[in-house]
């Protein structure tokens, strides 16, 4: 808008109007597209890609707020910033949703019934098998086109400063090529193998799931003691088991070799009850003599430990449970029964035959499918595995050498512990939606071919009967490539050169192993460098009582609803000021409301500023604004020599310098809460409460002539600098106000304006000390007036101070002090007050204050008032002391709350001292 001032700034702050307007503007002008220049330092981060099935929740809101703050901050420091957005195809989640949709279309009559979802799911699964992979995958794409960009639209509305031109989807053709390339290379290097091993199988989802996708639940169950008779009829061995139905697949009984109780049994054979098979008793050091009777059954096809024992002793593996969790023909008479039905029948039959010795209650830890919570079945299954040890080793070293810094620090150890005990990764899934494993089986000679493109014939027997693998890859396999596949790998693109490694990754702890660790391994493998230099693990957002937000508890806050109600800026600020590293966030609407009040404060300050400027402008008949054109020597950037500025200007500039440094340091360490608190305190309690108040007479005075008063120039600079500092936290309101400022029209957006206004030359400790002396005096007068019940009056004050320079300072600024403190007159003395002078108050720095008032006080009423205030304060202090002594409070409450409580306690304690002093003075008649 150049030199024109806008006619009117709305009285009421209406975030909704402002935010949707700017969000659209930023999007339309492609403001956050990373540049191709290589001159400026770059700062890159790839978003943790939300699932296409997802909708924005509070966890995203926190994550995106933290990322956006840092991206805007770096951008305003003149860096070439890339925040790369995208989504994940979410193999299993998408497949389940599409299945349910199919079921729903087929059975619309179930709508509204509580069991509908389960039935739709089952029907959908049946329909999927009926329609076959090709049609089903087509259906998934249709679903994705229609629903997959919900989070994108939500992020657009929230103004996330991402580069939409570089958006990626994990199943884009180019990305899929990268996935195939990575798989083939790993296979060629012998790091991917196919084999039959015990894996976790979800019978409901019909797929293998990795260890990480298994959630452990504790459930009340039993320990069954079963007798296995010796073949010669001379007694029996009793084994204890939590899964009696699997005994049908036993191929041995095992004991610990050091267990004397069984030394005579090892090497003999027992009869497997119910089936009558003869099986050996073996000795294996893996058997825990403390568990049950010390003798255990060995079921190699249904237990990973038993599988290992069977390997060592050359035992057969008999599968008695199938992929639908039903008993196989190997289970003899139990064939076809569901696993739990089979359990009942087995236990009953054992009891009938007198082979069930006893049953004990037992707390059982069961593994369930993360996706559907069905109990997973350990099954022997042919799957594809990634050999992890050769990949883990460099990934451990990268973190130990601090080529990747993990914050908060405690996650470093958690990461290293996990990586040092990591197992091979089962990467195949029996699903249809996802990246199909690039393998083919030759039906003529049995050869397995892994290739980038479909082979025309078998390289071994030249046969043409090739069957493609139907399994797809674990979704996390493709997302492990995210930091480089999004930049065009395996091509050697400019983006890859420019933005890899990323500078930073921000994620929640829940995906550190699923994703974080795997990106580090893959990055080192394929790019020979870490995927990012820093990894910041953000906290969880909990409710006000620090309970986890969950639908069943009904305490979920929908970020979009809260945003709609209070504005994005308020929600962002409330999150940022709560986001101390390593501490979960207690979040509530009340908190957002509080920072909505802060946004109002900013709005009102901006409005006052602009309206006053408008009046000034009018009084100068429209010619004044020209004076705001950049003028060398007057601007903040130019940093006029401090001596030529007024004290308040020198003070606000030196404060701005200090605050900028504090914010920079805090953000560099991810202390979002401190950075937010610093700018909040500065803007409200220094800029508004002191600086603007100090300048009020000067800026509200009509001007004569066309010279802009210097106060205006400096105020404009300071206000603009405040908007700069606030912008990363509250991008919308700051953008709106900034565009209304004079001489801002040159730039497209505040967010692209390099923040370089702080020059070392404005550091000015002298002005800071001087201003502080005046502030202390004004506050002391205000307190004294309030304690004496003189708030509405204008008493006179006498100041005693031996330091002539301080007296001179007060004299020089007498007018401001009288106005801000609400005094009639001030007089000064270098003499100290004599010991018997009543009503003397220390101000600090050797300054003493005494108030004179004309009215005679009603002593008794005053005493009652002081006693009442004292009582109130004592009550509050007792409560706070109890809280501060409470270890649980100190350890669990966020640091900011504990700190605020301590500060408040110190304030109260000071007030309490003053009240006692006042009561003493009142009693002595002073
Ligand atoms: Zn499942
Ligand atoms: Zn062949």
Image: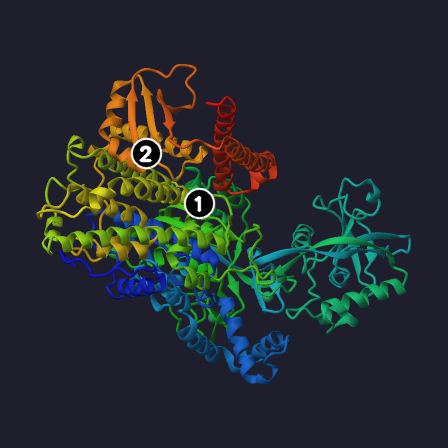
Residue placed most toward the observer, 531 or 293:
531
Answer yes or no: do the residues labelled 2 and 1 have beta carbons within 8 Å?
no
Q: Is residue 53 left or right of residue 224?
A: left
Q: List x then y, in percent, for residue 525.
A: 39, 50
- Mark 2 sits near ligand 1, with its Cβ under 8 Å away: no
**Circle count:** 2
Q: Residues within 10 Å of mark 2 (few under 14, many from 20)?
A: many
Q: Residues within 10 Å of mark 1 (few under 14, many from 20)?
A: many
Q: Is residue 359 left or right of residue 438?
A: right
Q: List x then y, in percent, for residue 162.
A: 32, 59
Residue on which disc 1 sits = 395
Residue placed most toward the observer, 306 or 345:
345
Which image quarter is the N terminus in?
A: bottom left
Q: List x then y, in percent, for residue 537.
A: 45, 47
Q: Residue at x 62, y 69 (%)?
A: 204
In the rendering, which numbered label is found on residue 87? none
Residue on which disc 2 sits = 823
Q: Residue at x 80, y 47 (%)?
A: 266
- Mark 1 sits near ligand 1, with its Cβ under 8 Å away: no
Residue placed most toward the observer, 29 or 421:
29
Q: Visible in this render: residue 526? A: no
Q: Is residue 251 left or right of residue 925?
A: right
Task: State the separation of the CA atoms marked 2 and 1.
Answer: 68 Å
Residue placed most toward the observer, 439 or 77:
77
Please report whichever mark, 2 or 1, sits nearer to the chain's N-terminal start: 1
Does dot 2 land on a helix, a strand or a loop? Answer: loop
Does dot 1 land on a helix, a strand or a loop? Answer: helix
Q: List x then y, in percent, for residue 692.
A: 27, 43
């Amino acid at each position: 808008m150049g030199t024109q001032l806008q006619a009117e700034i709305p009285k009421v702050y209406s975030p909704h109007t402002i935010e949707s307007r700017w969000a659209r503007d930023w999007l339309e002008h492609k403001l956050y597209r990373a540049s191709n220049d290589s001159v400026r330092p770059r700062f890159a981060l790839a978003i943790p890609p939300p699932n296409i099935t997802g909708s924005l929740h509070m966890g995203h809101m926190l994550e995106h707020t933290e990322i956006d703050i840092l991206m805007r901050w770096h951008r305003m420091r003149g860096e070439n910033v890339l925040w790369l957005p995208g989504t994940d195809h979410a193999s299993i989640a998408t497949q389940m949703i599409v299945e349910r949709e199919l079921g729903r279309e087929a059975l619309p009559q179930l709508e509204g019934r509580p069991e509908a979802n389960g039935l739709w799911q089952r029907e959908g699964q049946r329909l999927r098998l009926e329609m076959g992979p090709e049609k089903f995958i087509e259906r998934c794409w249709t679903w994705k086109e229609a629903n997959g960009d919900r989070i994108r639209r939500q992020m657009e509305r929230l103004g996330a400063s991402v580069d939409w031109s570089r958006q990626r989807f994990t199943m884009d053709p180019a990305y899929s090529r990268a996935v195939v390339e990575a798989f083939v290379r790993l296979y060629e290097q012998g790091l991917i193998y196919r084999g039959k091993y015990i894996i976790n199988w979800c019978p409901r989802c019909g797929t293998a799931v990795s260890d990480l996708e298994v959630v452990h639940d504790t459930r009340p169950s039993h320990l069954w003691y079963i007798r296995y008779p010796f073949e010669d009829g001379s007694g029996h061995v009793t084994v204890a088991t939590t899964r009696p139905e699997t005994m049908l697949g036993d191929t041995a009984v095992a004991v610990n070799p050091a267990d004397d109780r069984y030394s005579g049994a090892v090497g003999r054979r027992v009869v497997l009850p119910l089936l009558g098979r003869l099986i050996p008793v073996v000795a294996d050091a893996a058997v825990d003599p403390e568990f049950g009777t010390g003798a255990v059954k060995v079921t190699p096809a249904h237990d990973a430990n038993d599988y290992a024992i069977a390997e060592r002793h050359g035992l057969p593996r008999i599968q008695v449970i199938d992929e639908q969790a039903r008993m196989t023909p190997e289970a003899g008479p139990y064939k076809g029964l569901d696993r739990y039905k089979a359990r009942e029948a087995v236990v009953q039959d054992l009891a009938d035959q007198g082979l069930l010795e006893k049953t004990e209650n037992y707390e059982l830890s069961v593994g369930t499918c993360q996706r559907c919570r069905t109990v997973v079945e350990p099954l022997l299954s042919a799957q594809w595995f990634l050999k992890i040890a050769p990949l883990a080793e460099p990934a451990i070293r990268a973190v130990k050498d601090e080529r990747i810094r993990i914050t908060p620090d405690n996650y470093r150890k958690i990461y290293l512990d996990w990586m040092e005990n990591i197992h091979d990764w089962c990467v195949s899934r029996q699903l249809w939606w996802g990246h199909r494993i690039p393998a083919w089986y030759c039906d003529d000679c049995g050869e397995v071919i892994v290739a980038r493109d479909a082979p025309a014939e078998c390289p071994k027997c030249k046969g043409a009967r090739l069957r493609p693998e139907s399994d797809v890859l674990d979704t996390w396999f493709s997302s492990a490539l995210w930091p480089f596949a999004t930049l065009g790998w395996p091509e050697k693109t400019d983006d890859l050169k420019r933005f890899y490694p990323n500078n930073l990754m921000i994620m929640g702890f829940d995906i550190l192993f699923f994703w974080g660790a795997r990106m580090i391994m893959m990055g080192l493998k394929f790019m020979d460098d870490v995927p990012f230099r820093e990894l910041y693990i953000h906290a969880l957002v909990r409710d006000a009582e620090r309970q986890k937000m969950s639908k069943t508890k009904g305490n979920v806050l929908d970020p979009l609803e809260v945003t709609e109600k209070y504005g994005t800026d308020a929600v962002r600020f409330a999150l940022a000021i709560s986001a101390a590293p390593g501490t979960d966030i207690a979040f509530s609407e009340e908190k957002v409301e509080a920072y909505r009040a802060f946004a109002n404060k900013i709005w009102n300050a901006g409005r006052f500023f602009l309206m006053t400027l408008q009046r000034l402008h009018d009084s100068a008949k429209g010619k004044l604004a020209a004076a705001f054109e950049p003028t060398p020597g007057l601007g903040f950037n130019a940093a006029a020599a401090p001596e030529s500025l007024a004290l308040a200007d020198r003070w606000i500039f030196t404060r701005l310098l200090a605050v900028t440094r504090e914010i920079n340091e805090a953000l560099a360490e991810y202390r979002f809460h401190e950075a937010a608190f610093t700018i909040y305190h500065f803007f409200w309690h220094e800029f508004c409460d002191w600086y603007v108040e100090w300048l009020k007479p000067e800026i509200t005075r009509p001007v004569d002539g066309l010279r802009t008063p210097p106060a205006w120039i400096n105020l404009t600079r300071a206000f603009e600098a405040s908007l700069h500092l606030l912008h990363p936290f509250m991008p919308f309101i700051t953008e709106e106000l900034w565009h209304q400022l004079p001489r801002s029209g040159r730039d497209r957006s505040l967010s692209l304006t390099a923040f370089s206004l702080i020059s070392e030359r404005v550091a000015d400790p002298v002005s800071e000390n001087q201003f502080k002396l005046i502030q202390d005096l004004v506050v002391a007068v205000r307190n004294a007036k309030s304690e004496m019940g003189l708030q509405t009056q204008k008493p006179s004050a006498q100041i005693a101070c031996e330091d002539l320079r301080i007296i001179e300072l007060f004299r020089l600024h007498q007018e401001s002090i009288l106005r801000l403190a609400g005094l009639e007159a001030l007089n000064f003395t270098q003499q100290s007050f004599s010991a018997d002078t009543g009503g003397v108050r220390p101000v600090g720095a050797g300054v003493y204050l005494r108030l004179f008032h004309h009215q005679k006080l009603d002593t008794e009423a005053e005493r009652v008032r002081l006693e009442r205030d004292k009582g109130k304060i004592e009550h509050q202090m007792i409560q706070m002391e109890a809280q501060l002594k409470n270890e649980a409070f100190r350890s669990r409450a966020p640091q900011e709350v504990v700190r605020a409580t301590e500060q408040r306690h110190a304030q109260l304690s000071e007030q309490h001292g003053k009240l006692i002093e006042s009561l003493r003075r009142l009693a002595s008649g002073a």
